[in-house]
């Protein structure tokens, strides 16, 4: 139990993210300066029940997430209060700006913002890796799987490589300055528990040659980030194991990928569990209008499939931001 609180109100926002980047299933994650979830937390009673006594959801995607105690934000906030034996009562508001079931780390953004907000408000002397561990618990509430490839970049920013989950061991790298990203979001209807389903359909046994191919590609992705070489990253963004299975959930995906590459993208792949697609390019080589051609060319493929889609130009994000502390 904390003896005294220094602050009573905090506001934090955490960005969307893209996971896997081709071969890095559950290992690679990149924060995106595309959309943000914001979590506002206020102490209502310092000697209370250790619960979230008021909860509200706002924002463009508020209708897509639970507005009651089933929301991962409530579950995670109360988990943190219990873990650190804090008996304050909280008022929590979630502003939902990252679209759920889009493959852009929606639950990860909410979990990241909640973890950082609680750690800041309660004055927990918690290193960044421990805050990531708290956020992983939120992902487990949301998807049933404690994965860190979205929450880690959402908190830390940049590109994250996860070496191990038990114990959690990861490293963060700054992306190249010229790394440009096109995100295409098709309106593909997927199951409500999309992430869980997208994991269940993955193969349990994999041909050794495919494993070797993915290891080589993953090494190129990491080297590309370490050497600040966007073209090297792109050379490694090919997945021989997960993408072939998940691409079947996205009508027209192969044609969309080919069209994006023909329009000038260096690489195209599925963002996380999909259905969003990411394409990367070098800002040193393509003008903004050319980057938009990549997005529009992919959107056109989905239009041919009878599917509405939109595209966005973005860049890597620096991670979670503290907006207010009182």
Image (cartoon, grey):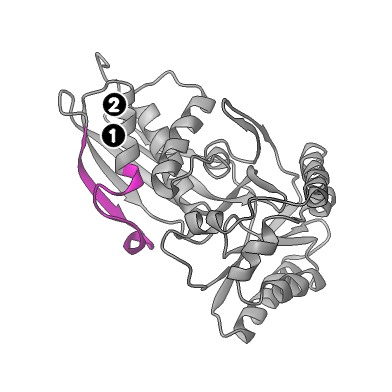
Can you tell which mark lies on residue 78?
1
Q: Is residue 124 above or below residue 192?
A: above
Place of residue 65 in the rendered image (x, y in percent of width and height, measured from the top left): 34, 57
Residue 53 among those drawn in magenta: yes
Q: Quadrant of residue 324?
A: top left
- Is residue 132 left or right of 228 when viewed as pictured? left
Chain part drawn in magenta: 51-73
Judge whether residue 39 can be spotted in this image: yes
- Is residue 146 left or right of 179 when viewed as pictured? left
Judge whether residue 278 can be spotted in this image: no
Image quadrant where one finds the N terminus:
top left
Place of residue 169 in the rendered image (x, y in percent of width and height, measured from the top left): 61, 27
Q: SS class of the residue under badge 2?
A: helix
Residue 324 among those drawn in magenta: no
Place of residue 14 in the rendered image (x, y in percent of width and height, measured from the top left): 47, 44
> Are the residues at dot 2 and dot 1 in contact (C-beta closer than 8 Å)?
yes
Image quadrant where one finds the C terminus:
top left
Of residue 243 and residue 36, the one placed in the foreground of this image is 243
Q: SS class of the residue under badge 1?
A: helix
Q: Is residue 53 above or below residue 122?
A: below
- Is residue 229 left or right of 201 when viewed as pictured? right
| Circle 2 residue | 82
x 76%, y 51%: residue: 178
Q: Residues within 10 Å of mark 2 (few under 14, many from 20)?
A: some
Numbered disc total: 2
């Amino acid at each position: 139990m904390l003896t005294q609180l220094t602050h009573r109100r905090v506001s934090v926002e955490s960005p969307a993210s893209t996971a896997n980047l081709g071969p890095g299933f559950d290992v690679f994650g990149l924060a995106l300066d595309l959309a943000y979830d914001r979590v506002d937390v206020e102490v209502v009673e310092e000697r209370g029940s250790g619960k979230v006594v008021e909860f509200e959801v706002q924002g463009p995607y508020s209708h897509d997430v639970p507005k009651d105690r089933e929301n991962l934000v409530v579950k995670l906030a109360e988990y943190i209060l219990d873990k650190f034996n804090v008996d304050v009562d909280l008022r929590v508001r979630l502003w939902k700006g990252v679209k759920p079931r889009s493959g852009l780390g929606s639950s990860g953004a909410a979990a990241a913002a909640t973890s950082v907000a609680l750690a800041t408000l309660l004055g927990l002397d918690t290193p960044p890796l421990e805050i990531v561990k708290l956020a992983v618990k939120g992902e487990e509430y949301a998807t049933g799987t404690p994965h860190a490839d979205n929450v880690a970049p959402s908190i830390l920013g940049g590109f994250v490589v996860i070496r191990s989950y038990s114990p959690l061991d990861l490293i963060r790298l700054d992306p190249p300055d010229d790394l440009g990203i096109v995100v295409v979001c098709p309106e593909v209807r997927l199951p409500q528990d999309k992430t869980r389903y997208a994991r269940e359909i993955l193969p349990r046994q994999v041909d050794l040659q495919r494993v070797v191919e993915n290891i080589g590609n993953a090494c190129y992705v990491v080297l590309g980030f370490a050497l600040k070489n966007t073209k090297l990253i792109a050379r490694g963004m090919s997945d021989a194991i997960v993408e072939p299975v998940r691409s079947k959930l996205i009508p027209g995906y192969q044609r969309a990928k080919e069209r994006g590459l023909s329009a000038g993208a260096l690489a195209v792949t599925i963002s996380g569990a999909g259905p969003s697609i990411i394409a990367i390019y070098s800002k040193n080589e393509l003008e903004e209008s050319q980057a938009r051609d990549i997005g529009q060319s992919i959107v056109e493929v989905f239009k041919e499939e009878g599917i509405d889609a939109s595209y966005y130009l973005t860049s890597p994000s620096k991670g979670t931001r503290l907006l207010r502390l009182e």
